[in-house]
Image (cartoon, helix red, strand yellow):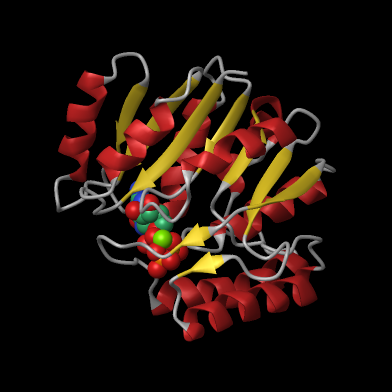
Amino acid sequence: MDVLVVVPTYNERENLPTLVSSVLERDGYRLLVVDDGSPDGTGEVADGLAARWPGRLRVLHRTGPRGLGRSYVDAFCQAVQEPADVVCQMDADLSHDPAHLPALVAAARDHDLVLGSRYLHGISVVNWPLHRIALSTGANAYIRAVTKLPARDCTSGFRCWRRDALERMPLREIMSDGYSFQIEMLWQAVRLGFRVTEVPIVFFERREGHSKLSGRVLSEALWMPWRLRFGGRKRT
Ligand SMILES: Nc1nc2c(ncn2[C@@H]2O[C@H](COP(=O)(O)OP(=O)(O)OP(=O)(O)O)[C@@H](O)[C@H]2O)c(=O)[nH]1
Ligand SMILES: [Mg+2]
């Protein structure tokens, strides 16, 4: 399988080199880094890595308003044009271990979307304080209750799409720009009748850099499930 891994970055200069070598040590894997003009110079670090891995790593430098959702939409629109069988997505902060990629890719042989799930067999997160675990598991219970989505981990950003399925997603219609992007993409995938499954992952708290989780991002994730359920269409 040809695998393209999309990684959004904002201020991840300490983490990106480790992530890149660990993904690209696998044959058949390529990376698309989408940087949002990180003030810490992650974009230049990414360009340096691209020069070291010719043909294996490409960098998309975004300008204008930043956002996780916008970054993914831009990157996925490019990714579906590439000669890849599957398109994976993962964070740059080393919370997502590239060692799980082969299991996600294998499950995509007979599924359109594979979710790397922290909550499949109990709770598999390492070094998260109790309040983060409570926030994340509580958010997932809430999202499932409102949307009836059939997944244990609706907010995971560690995923694998079959490229032909991702191509059918209404990417430019996605409303969410932050954290709830993951919820909305899963919602649309289920609505399109995609075959969705979860595989277990272990999630590690970031050791370098800072979380971009903000009050605005959290409030979007709180109301987005209702908006999806009642069918709002306007982009934020
Ligand atoms: N391009 C881009 N990437 C972003 C943006 N915000 C966050 N990211 C990246 O998205 C990934 C997830 O962001 P995090 O800040 O780790 O958010 P999180 O994983 O939900 O929160 P933590 O668990 O606290 O780390 C990381 O690779 C970030 O660098 C953004 O506005 N633009
Ligand atoms: Mg993170």
Residue 88 in which image quadrant: top right
Q: Residue at x 34, y 24 (%)?
A: 57
* Residue 16 can be seen in this image: yes
Counting from the top left corner in percent of width and height, residue 39 is at 15, 53
Going by the image, does 167 lie left or right of 67? right
Counting from the top left corner in percent of width and height, residue 215 is at 41, 79
* Residue 230 can be seen in this image: no
Q: Residue at x 62, y 69 (%)?
A: 224
Quadrant assignment for ligand 1: bottom left
Image quadrant containing the N terminus: top right
Q: Residue at x 46, y 36 (%)?
A: 6
Going by the image, does 11 lie left or right of 122? left
Numbered circles on residues, count: 0
Going by the image, does 97 lie left or right of 229? left
Q: Residue at x 81, y 50 (%)?
A: 191
Q: Nearer the viewer, residue 194 or 107?
A: 107
Going by the image, does 229 lie left or right of 67? right
Above or below residue 199? Residue 2 is above
Counting from the top left corner in percent of width and height, residue 92 is at 37, 48
Above or below residue 6? Residue 1 is above
Counting from the top left corner in percent of width and height, residue 202 is at 56, 57
Above or below residue 55? Residue 108 is below
